[in-house]
Amino acid sequence: MIDPLVLSGGAVLTPGGLRDADLVIEGEVIAAVEPDAARSSNRVDVAGRWVLPGIVDLHGDAVERALSPRPSAPMTAESALVENDRAMLAAGITTAYLSLTDGFEPGLRSRERLREVIGAWRRLRPVLGVDTRIHVRHERCNVDDFDELLAWLADGTIELLSLNDHAPPPGHAPDGTAASVQARTGMSPDDALAVARRAVEQRPTGLEQEPELVAAAHTAGVPIASHDDADAEQVAASAALGVRIAEFPFTLAAAHAARGHGQSVLLGAPNLVRGGSHLGNLSVADAVSAGAVDVLASDYHYSSLLAAPFVAMDRGLTDVASAWSLVAERPARAAGLDDRGRLEAGQRADVIVVDPGARVRSPEIVVAGGEIAYSVRPSAVAAPAALPR
């Protein structure tokens, strides 16, 4: 028998708030949260630290930097996923939805690259430290290989689907989209412009495909997210499709409208940490103050997801339990996961240990699925006698 792992002497964030207690982990689940838990040879002293639920990240596209550090320098999908896994653990993320674009351009955001990443993920998933899942950001104007997309929904490969449309809006010049494509791909200006124009041409076909795609997601029990809804009208159109998660609504009015339709509002943690949106959209601080946000996601910067709740607390926007629920319990529930996000008996043992008084808060220990997956403390390892032989 392996002794249970006990995180001893810390302040544990329970559903009722912070509580001085020991957290006892047996196998992959939390066995108890109680004062002075039974002695164990596998005991880690975390006095003076907060013991928090592991972070659940529903939208993390920083993986793109590991996949392609520069437009002309793509890395192998397997090496990128391993690198990304370590970065997420160091940020306290224990459940992650890799946000991968199913786009209309070549290179990083193409179906070909998405296919490669999914293949690598299937091979590596059992050995990754983070419970890593696939979130496909489907561009409406990508209409190729539609049956493949449906098959990924049916077989459980895709566990979160976002509906995106980053092609030029009707009546708008394609130059801005072309510039973005050029920056990501390194294409010539003329070739990038041709890609943007072709996307516009394909939009009617994409709109024809959308009802079948949405129906396939509902049949598979896959949550659907909208992306960048700008106003109540767009929110209503998303709600008509059965969207459960509103990703990055542009305005406070759109966020309130989404919540009025029963959608969980997801916003980016870097927005709160930096003090505003880098695109000039809705401020997360304003949304928190107005009670108009349910979920924070890493977006393009993993470590901001742990920093953001502390920023919210330090600024007096909310209390510790409410702040941490934005990155743990509420994203888990929005994704349909009821086995994680809280520290209580029977929950999956995803736990992080943080010094709340540190100048820069970061995990000292990360437990994922009952195992210490990351630690900056050499003592936080199982005693040799407790290891299986």
Image (cartoon, helix red, strand yellow):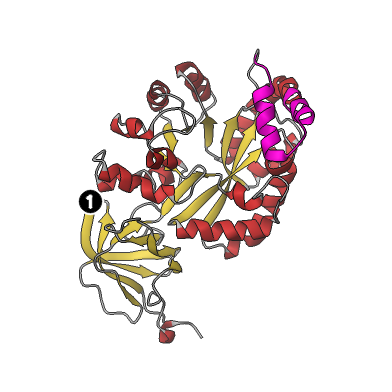
SS at mark 1?
loop
In the rendered image, residue 180 lying in the magenta stretch gets the answer yes
Q: Given the image, on which type of amino acid does mark 1 rest? A: Gly
In the rendered image, residue 185 lying in the magenta stretch gets the answer yes
Q: Is residue 383 above or below residue 107?
A: below
* Quadrant occupied by the N terminus: bottom left
Residue 111 picture quarter: top right
Q: Is residue 388 left or right of residue 257?
A: right
Could you tell me if residue 103 is visible in this image?
A: no
Could you tell me if residue 59 is visible in this image?
A: yes
Residue at label 1? 16
Q: Is residue 12 left or right of residue 369?
A: left
Q: Report the residue at 61% width, 31% height from top.
A: 215
Residue 310, horizontal then vertical, whole percent: 31, 48
Q: Is residue 329 above or below residue 46?
A: above
Residue 268 picture quarter: top left
What is the chief secondary structure element of the magenta stretch?
helix
Q: In this view, does 15 lie above or below 354?
A: above
Q: In this view, does 80 lie above or below 166?
A: below
**Which stretch did the figure color magenta?**
172-197
Q: Report the residue at 40% width, 83% height from top.
A: 383
Residue 315 picture quarter: top left
